[in-house]
Image (spheres, grey):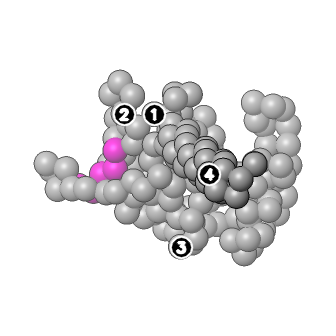
């Protein structure tokens, strides 16, 4: 095989590998957007002047959104069936949360033990609530369950695949 032919084959292989990398990157962005369509939610003022955030359902029908706990980025899964905001123990260590007494709790998966804590601030798209009661649970996973200790301080209005959260 001639030298120019080897170079041509090498360039063709490099072009195909580059194309595959670009397609993989684009597919990753597409899938992430379907899993979390609310990666940067923004608060606006409604017609009544109240602060509000609009969230879109993900492909599984859940409301997932990025937000902040004590000024550190987290991913929330909104859970109106959870009494408290629930955080995995590893994430709680990363957030440097002070753990209170251990409590027994009933979950959909049965009885578990977790520690009470108090979050200085929880923010979602610019809506910030201070002093939010939470629980730290073992093996909860990467998402923070954004439960009613945060959500009850807002008005929630669901229309189709959209959820409006309004600060009263």
Assign a secondary structure to mark 2: strand
Instruction: Report if residue 52 lies within the magenta region.
Output: yes
Tag 3 near tag 4, CB within 8 Å: no
Q: Is residue 2 above or below residue 32?
A: below
Assign a secondary structure to mark 4: helix
Residue bearing mark 1: 57
Outermost residue toward the front in this view: 2
Question: Toward the viewer: 45 or 55?
Answer: 55
Instruction: Report if residue 17 lies within the magenta region.
Output: no
Q: Would residue 139 be visible to someone looking at this image?
A: yes
Q: Position of residue 3 (x, y in %)?
A: 70, 58
Q: How many labels were placed on the picture?
A: 4
Q: Would residue 144 be visible to someone looking at this image?
A: no
Q: CA distance from mark 3 to mark 1?
A: 25 Å
Residue bearing mark 3: 71
Crowding near pointer 4: few (<14 within 10 Å), some, many (20+)?
Answer: few
Q: Is residue 66 above or below residue 70?
A: above
Residue bearing mark 2: 162
Crowding near pointer 3: few (<14 within 10 Å), some, many (20+)?
Answer: few
- Which residue range is magenta in the image? 50-54
Assign a secondary structure to mark 3: loop
Q: Earlier in the sequence, mark 3 or mark 1?
A: 1
Crowding near pointer 1: few (<14 within 10 Å), some, many (20+)?
Answer: some
Residue bearing mark 4: 8
Q: Earlier in the sequence, mark 1 or mark 2?
A: 1
Q: Earlier in the sequence, mark 2 or mark 4?
A: 4
């Amino acid at each position: 095989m001639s030298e120019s032919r080897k170079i041509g084959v090498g360039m063709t292989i490099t072009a195909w590998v580059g194309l595959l990398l670009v397609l993989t990157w684009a597919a990753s962005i597409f899938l992430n957007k379907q899993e979390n369509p609310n990666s940067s939610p923004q608060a606006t003022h409604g017609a009544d002047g109240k602060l509000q955030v609009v969230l879109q359902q993900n492909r599984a029908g859940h409301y997932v959104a990025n937000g902040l706990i004590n000024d550190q980025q987290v991913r929330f899964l909104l859970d109106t069936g959870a009494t408290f905001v629930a955080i995995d123990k590893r994430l709680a260590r990363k957030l440097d949360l002070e753990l209170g007494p251990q409590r027994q709790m009933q979950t959909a998966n049965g009885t578990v033990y977790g520690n009470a804590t108090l979050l200085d601030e929880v923010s979602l798209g610019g809506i910030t609530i201070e002093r939010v009661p939470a629980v730290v649970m073992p093996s909860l996973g990467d998402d923070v369950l954004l439960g009613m200790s945060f959500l009850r301080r807002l008005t929630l209005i669901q229309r189709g695949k959209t959820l409006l959260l309004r600060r009263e």
